[in-house]
Image (cartoon, helix red, strand yellow):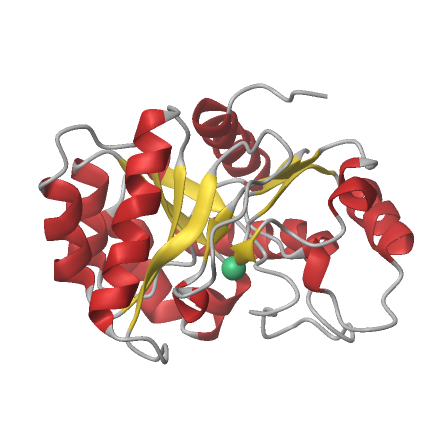
Amino acid sequence: MRWFDTHCHLDRLPAGSDLAATMTRAKRAGVERLIVPGVAGSPKRVAELTAYAGVELAWGVHPDFADTPWQSPGFQPVAIGECGLDRRAQHSIEDQERAFAWQLELAAKYNLPAIIHLVGHYQRAFDLLAAMPKRPRLVMHSWSGSPEMALRFVDAGAYVSVSGGHLRRPEKLARLLAALPLSSLLLETDAPDMAPPFWSGDSNEPSALPLIGAAVAEIAGMPVEKFAEILYNNSVGLFGESRQ
Ligand SMILES: [Zn+2]
């Protein structure tokens, strides 16, 4: 089986983490491709990250960093994000929305997927997207809203990404999986955050993805091999063939 971690912060592993060992464990577990989102612009340690086969970088500004001055990425991003709205962020909703809208326009202009971080403000984000003359392809990363709202985004062309955090509320995840077409689903670890409940490692990392995938497949009532292949292909459909 092969797996695609559509969202992992390899540049933000805890201090003292061994990136090479983390990548070896990921490869051994069958995690073939990994997207590192931007949080405050470009990921940190760009050259170090792209030295690993399968690692691809996005560029973006998380709502927590909505006032970060823009900087040129210095690399070809595979996506824009993570960008969005977060009711817990310190910045005003107006500042967040400005940064979000600007990044959505950038994604549309360069024909790149936008990786979206939404905590609350679901309708506001939906309205903002609906008002765009040209919408980029979208990933709703580690979706935290209702299944009904997720389906509205999917109907507008979005993918919905499931993380290990969802396994902490299996009934809610079951409702989400029941509401969405398989063709709209992606998987992510969101490492080093969002560890699945059974994870005993020091911090969450991409090698947890197959375990997360197996647990999600079970809740979806599907053989894990089939589930893995479909979600891998969904990810390639969105992010394209590997550039490496
Ligand atoms: Zn993230």
Q: In this view, does 64 lie to the left or right of 109?
A: right
Q: Please state which of residues 140 and 134 is positioned toward the viewer in this rendering.
A: 134
Q: Please state which of residues 112 and 226 is positioned toward the viewer in this rendering.
A: 112
Q: Name which residue lies at 76% across and 51% down.
A: 45
Q: Is residue 152 left or right of residue 231?
A: left
Q: Is the residue 207 above or below the residue 222 in the image? A: below
Q: Is residue 29 visible?
A: no
Q: Name which residue lies at 90% across and 50% down.
A: 20
Q: In this view, does 154 lie to the left or right of 227?
A: left
Q: Can residue 234 be seen in this view?
A: yes
Q: Name which residue lies at 55% across and 29% down.
A: 229
**Figure quadrant of the N terminus:** top right
Residue 199 image offset from top left, x and y in percent: 69, 71
Residue 94 image offset from top left, x and y in percent: 20, 67
Q: Is the residue 210 above or below the residue 233 in the image? A: below
Residue 184 image offset from top left, x and y in percent: 34, 37
Q: Is residue 170 left or right of residue 24?
A: left
Q: Please state which of residues 42 and 12 is positioned toward the viewer in this rendering.
A: 42
Q: Name which residue lies at 47% across and 74% down.
A: 168
**Figure quadrant of the C terminus:** top right
Q: Name which quarter of the figure residue 83 lies in.
A: bottom left
Q: Name which quarter of the figure residue 130 lies in.
A: top left
